[in-house]
Image (cartoon, rainbow, N blue to C red):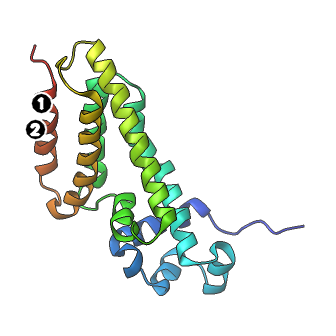
């Protein structure tokens, strides 16, 4: 009968999020990963196989435990209010740290097909959710009727990526909040 694991996999993967956010993939050395996850080297390789496989599992965990909570705002599809709430929570999520997924796309996207695939799926989902919210906002009379919904959704998706990178540089300033207001303000109908 197989033995039950003596560790909390979600905790290990959450610790991996912190390591990769702090150092990136290439900067995260195995000694620190082993130390922070409290695995021994043999146990780590038995469980995960490689640092790269560990990263993929960490990214999956990151999406389910963190990004999906932010994406849920868009998926309620309440028009412009959903988009505003998404950006409010996303800015808080990335402030001072950036986004692990966007960081990995930036660092590994040219060389790692799996990271590129994970990133493409996330950005496609994000854009589709923006399209749905913009269509609802149009029906509710929250946005100007002349906007190109697909182009605007692409623009919002691109801003999400830029916010993730800028969050590392902006630290705890309110730059991203101001940028969000400047981004969404022109879309809304003044009442």
In the rendered view, tell whether residue 69 sits above or below residue 82.
Answer: below
Query: Which residue carries the number 2 mark?
Result: 182
Q: What is the tally of numbered marks visible in this picture? A: 2
Q: Report if the CB atoms under discs 2 and 1 are less than 8 Å apart.
A: yes
Task: Count neighbours of disc 1 (C-alpha within 10 A) and say few if under 14, some if 14 to 19, many if 20 or more.
Answer: few
> Crowdedness of circle 2 by 10 Å Cα count: few (<14), some, many (20+)?
few
Q: Identify the residue at horizontal 61%, vertical 84% (top origin).
A: 40
Image position of 183 with respect to 188: above or below: below
In-image side of 95 versus 35 (left or right): left
Q: Which residue lies at the image location 48% right of the left edge and 55% below the top edge?
A: 118
**In the picture, residue 100 is in which quadrant?**
bottom left
For the N terminus, the quadrant is bottom right
- Distance in Å between CA atoms under marks 2 and 1: 5 Å
The residue sitting at 60% across, 85% down in the picture is 41
Q: What element carries label 2?
A: helix
The answer to whether residue 34 is left or right of residue 130 is right
Name the residue tied to disc 1.
185
Observer-nearest residue: 15 or 105?
105
Who is closer to the viewer here, 154 or 189? 154
Q: Choose between 162 and 149: the one closer to the eye.
A: 149
Kindly give the residue lying farthest to the right in the view shown. 1
Q: Quadrant of residue 107?
A: bottom left
Residue 73 visible in rendering? no
Q: Residue 27 carries which label?
A: none
What x and y, as percent, mark residue 87?
26, 40
Is residue 35 among the parts visible in the rendering? Answer: yes
Coordinates of residue 158 in the picture (x, y in percent): 26, 47
Q: Residue at x 77, y 65 (%)?
A: 4
């Amino acid at each position: 009968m197989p033995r039950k694991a003596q560790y909390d996999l979600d905790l290990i993967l959450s610790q991996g999020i912190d390591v990769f956010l702090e150092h990136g993939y290439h900067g995260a050395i195995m000694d620190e990963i082993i130390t922070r996850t409290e695995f021994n080297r043999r146990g780590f390789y038995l469980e995960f196989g490689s640092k790269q496989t560990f990263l993929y599992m960490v990214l999956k965990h990151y999406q389910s435990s963190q990004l999906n909570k932010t994406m849920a705002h868009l998926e309620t599809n309440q028009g412009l209010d959903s988009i505003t709430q998404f950006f409010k929570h996303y800015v808080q999520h990335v402030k001072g740290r950036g986004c692990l997924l966007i960081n990995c796309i930036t660092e590994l996207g040219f060389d790692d097909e799996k990271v590129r695939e994970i990133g493409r799926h996330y950005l496609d989902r994000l854009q589709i959710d923006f399209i749905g919210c913009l269509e609802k906002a149009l029906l509710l009379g929250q946005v100007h009727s002349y906007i190109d919904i697909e182009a605007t959704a692409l623009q919002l998706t691109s801003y999400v990526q830029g916010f993730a990178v800028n969050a590392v540089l902006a630290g705890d300033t309110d730059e991203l909040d101001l940028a969000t207001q400047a981004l969404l303000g022109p879309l809304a109908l003044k009442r």
